[in-house]
Amino acid sequence: MVGKMDHSSDRRKCIEARSLIHRIAAVAMVVTSVYHIIYLAFSPRGRKLFMDFLPKEGISTEFGNSMNIFSETPQKPRFGRFSYIEKMEYRK
């Protein structure tokens, strides 16, 4: 069996490496999430960012204004700091 290569050890090494990379990425994601929550809770800019992402009373007006781009009126839609689309993307 001198000429036969052992592919099972190579495959095992790849699986171990993939598992390690996955765990490192998971820890990085958790650390980043905790940092983001702390930033939102304790920094003035983070609190303002959080408040700007909350839905306002004119969310239906924003949506209606964005549908006006399909009409022939030259008026552009008016949004606040973030449009309703960006607010929904942030919550995903």
Image (tube, rainbow, N blue to C red):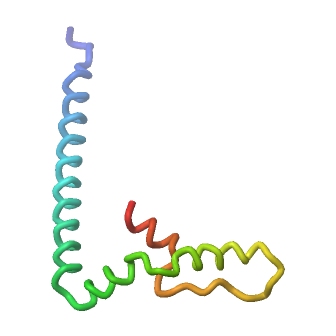
Q: Quadrant of the N terminus?
A: top left
Measuring from the top left, give residue 18's x and y in whole percent. Answer: 24, 41
Q: Residue at x 69, y 72 (%)?
A: 67
Q: Is residue 54 left or right of residue 11?
A: right
Residue 37, located in which quarter of the rendered image? bottom left
**For the view shown, which residue lies furthest in the right direction?**
72
Q: For the view shown, which residue lies furthest in the bottom direction?
A: 44
Residue 19 found in image quarter: top left
Q: Position of residue 42 (x, y in %)?
A: 16, 84
Residue at (51% x, 73% y) in the render: 84
| Lateral position of residue 31 relative to residue 71, left or right | left
Check the image and name the residue furthest to the front. 57
- Left or right: where does residue 63 sit relative to residue 13? right
Q: 9 or 45, which is in the foreground?
A: 45
Q: Is residue 66 above or below residue 74?
A: above
The answer to whether 14 is drawn above or below residue 59 in the figure is: above
Which residue: 69% across, 86% down? 76
